[in-house]
């Protein structure tokens, strides 16, 4: 791995880092101002549009059964009105620039020097500062009601918008993976990350109508999902917390779950959870634990550690249900540490086809369902690593992915390394295309462009 130093970082920010694309995204500068016929740069005047309930976050509140908060709506409307005035006065570029200028940046400089509340008006200004300061890590935060670097001495400074972000970290699955642990990751355990990402995308899209969800490899052992829809950006902290609660089926630390208990007792479960079980979790579980090659440490028919994980999870599920089901399983499966599992015998020990399906679904939820770091998602002012920066621990790029490539992505080999990018002084289109495509789709979406 190349040593990251002042020289390599300066060169990276000067010649490789896609500042123009990043600032276009973070300012949501989706199109140019509309000009009147015969005008000399004055935008067409339009009737101001009110912030709709869906745009202000009320659509999410309705889906979650929450009441509207007038103060939150007022804060969101205030930020929208500032942006709107710029467009209506013929200052479309200025409006987007003002939005960017109110966005918080945070630099971590070499030597773990942490500097918050930075602000930049343009791509040129940001690039110049990146080359001058050569940060080892860049985090980005919320859009505030004022420029964050001017907050000194002001009493009313608050975030008005931020993307809704979900963080999937492989270390949260340490107790159920046999191939790696801690900061390590391999193509085998990437299956958990990929499965979690697809499950979350399905729920966010089907249950809440979010369309612009960008998956970004973190640079080491996880993936960040940036939900960029206007409705998502304007959600309040309470709405974000409620949405995370909706997405959390299994408690990350205790692994408690009412849905797992329902399955153990063969009761009906939420249709969304049943849908992702049938379409995604079951397939991912089988590919990882059962149908994988014998050299995959997670295969329960060849590796005792993996077999123990499945047996332990199954026993935990059965203890939530009827005693006779647990007794039957223990009578048929005489498991000791060091054993492997015979899959057909395991299924027979679970009872009838329906009983086995319910228990197996409960096990799949415990082992495969997304485990979320709620603090990343629930606060508007939370900071998160900016895409396209280099991970200081691996020198790998924090890169956006196409959804079609998430499953086959190899976290140890596919992401470009700093040395490779410096040799070519360029970034392959493969890594910029996902964000370019999302912005292009947003540009043609009236809900994302209307004022």
Image: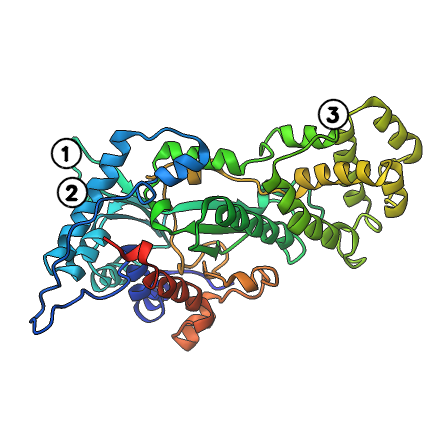
Return the residue at label 3: 320
Question: What residue appears at the point 49 percent right and 67 percent down from the top-left corner?
Answer: 416
Per the rendering, the mark at residue 154 is 1
- Between 13 and 189, the one lying in front of the other is 189
Image side of residue 268 versus residue 162, left or right: right
Return the residue at label 2: 150
Question: What residue appears at the point 23 percent right and 36 percent down from the top-left corner?
Answer: 75
Image side of residue 260 versus residue 165, left or right: right
Per the rendering, the mark at residue 17 is none
Question: What residue appears at the point 43 percent right and 73 percent down from the top-left corner?
Answer: 429
Question: What residue appears at the point 59 percent right and 42 percent down from the top-left corner?
Answer: 272
Quick check: marks 1 and 2 in contact, CB under 8 Å? yes
Q: Position of residue 397 (x, y in %)?
A: 46, 61
User: Dot 1, how many residues are within 10 Å of its Cα: few (below 14), some (14-19), or many (20+)?
Assistant: few
Q: Position of residue 117 (x, y in %)?
A: 25, 44
Q: Is residue 5 visible?
A: yes
Instruction: Please tell me in which quadrant of the rendered image residue 425 appears.
Output: bottom left
- Between 129 and 242, the one lying in front of the other is 242
Q: Which of the marked residues, 3 or 1, is nearer the chain's N terminus?
A: 1
């Amino acid at each position: 791995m190349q040593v990251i130093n002042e020289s390599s970082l300066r060169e990276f920010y000067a010649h490789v880092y896609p500042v123009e694309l990043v600032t276009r995204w973070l300012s949501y500068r989706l199109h140019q101002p509309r000009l009147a016929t015969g005008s000399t740069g004055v935008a067409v005047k339009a009737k101001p549009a009110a912030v709709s309930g869906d745009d202000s976050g009320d659509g999410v509140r309705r889906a979650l059964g929450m009441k509207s908060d007038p103060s939150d709506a007022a804060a969101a409307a205030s930020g929208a009105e500032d942006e709107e005035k710029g467009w209506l006065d013929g200052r479309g570029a200025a409006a987007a620039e003002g939005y960017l200028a109110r966005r918080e940046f945070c630099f971590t400089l070499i030597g773990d020097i942490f500097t918050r509340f930075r602000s930049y008006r343009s791509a040129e200004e940001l690039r110049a500062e990146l080359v001058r300061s050569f940060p080892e890590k860049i985090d980005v935060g919320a859009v505030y009601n004022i420029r964050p670097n001017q907050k000194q001495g002001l009493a009313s400074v608050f975030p008005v918008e931020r993307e809704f972000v979900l963080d999937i970290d492989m270390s949260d699955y340490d107790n159920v993976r046999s191939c790696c642990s801690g900061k390590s990751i391999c193509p085998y355990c990437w299956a958990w990350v990929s499965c979690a990402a697809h499950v979350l995308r399905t729920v966010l899209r089907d249950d809440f109508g979010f369309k612009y969800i960008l998956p970004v490899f973190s640079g080491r052992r996880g993936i960040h999902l940036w939900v960029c829809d206007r409705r998502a950006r304007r959600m309040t902290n309470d709405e974000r917390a409620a949405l995370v609660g909706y997405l959390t089926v299994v408690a990350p630390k205790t692994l408690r779950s009412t849905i797992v208990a329902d399955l153990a007792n063969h009761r009906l479960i939420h249709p969304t959870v049943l849908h992702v079980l049938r379409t995604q979790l079951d397939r991912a579980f089988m590919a990882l634990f059962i149908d994988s090659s014998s050299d995959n440490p997670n295969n329960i028919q060849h590796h005792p550690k993996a077999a123990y994980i499945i047996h332990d999870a199954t026993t935990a599920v059965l203890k939530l249900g009827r005693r006779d089901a647990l007794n039957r399983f223990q009578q048929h499966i005489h498991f000791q540490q060091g054993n492997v599992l015979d899959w057909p015998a395991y299924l027979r020990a679970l009872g009838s086809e329906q009983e086995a399906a319910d228990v197996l679904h409960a096990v799949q939820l415990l082992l495969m369902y997304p485990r979320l770091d709620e603090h990343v998602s629930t606060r508007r002012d939370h900071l998160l690593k900016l895409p396209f920066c280099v991970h200081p621990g691996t020198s790998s790029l924090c890169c956006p992915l196409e959804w079609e490539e998430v499953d086959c992505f190899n976290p140890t080999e596919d992401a470009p390394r700093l040395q490779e990018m410096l040799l070519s002084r360029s970034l392959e289109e493969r890594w910029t295309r996902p964000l370019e495509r999302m912005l292009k789709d947003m540009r043609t979406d009236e809900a994302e462009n209307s004022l």
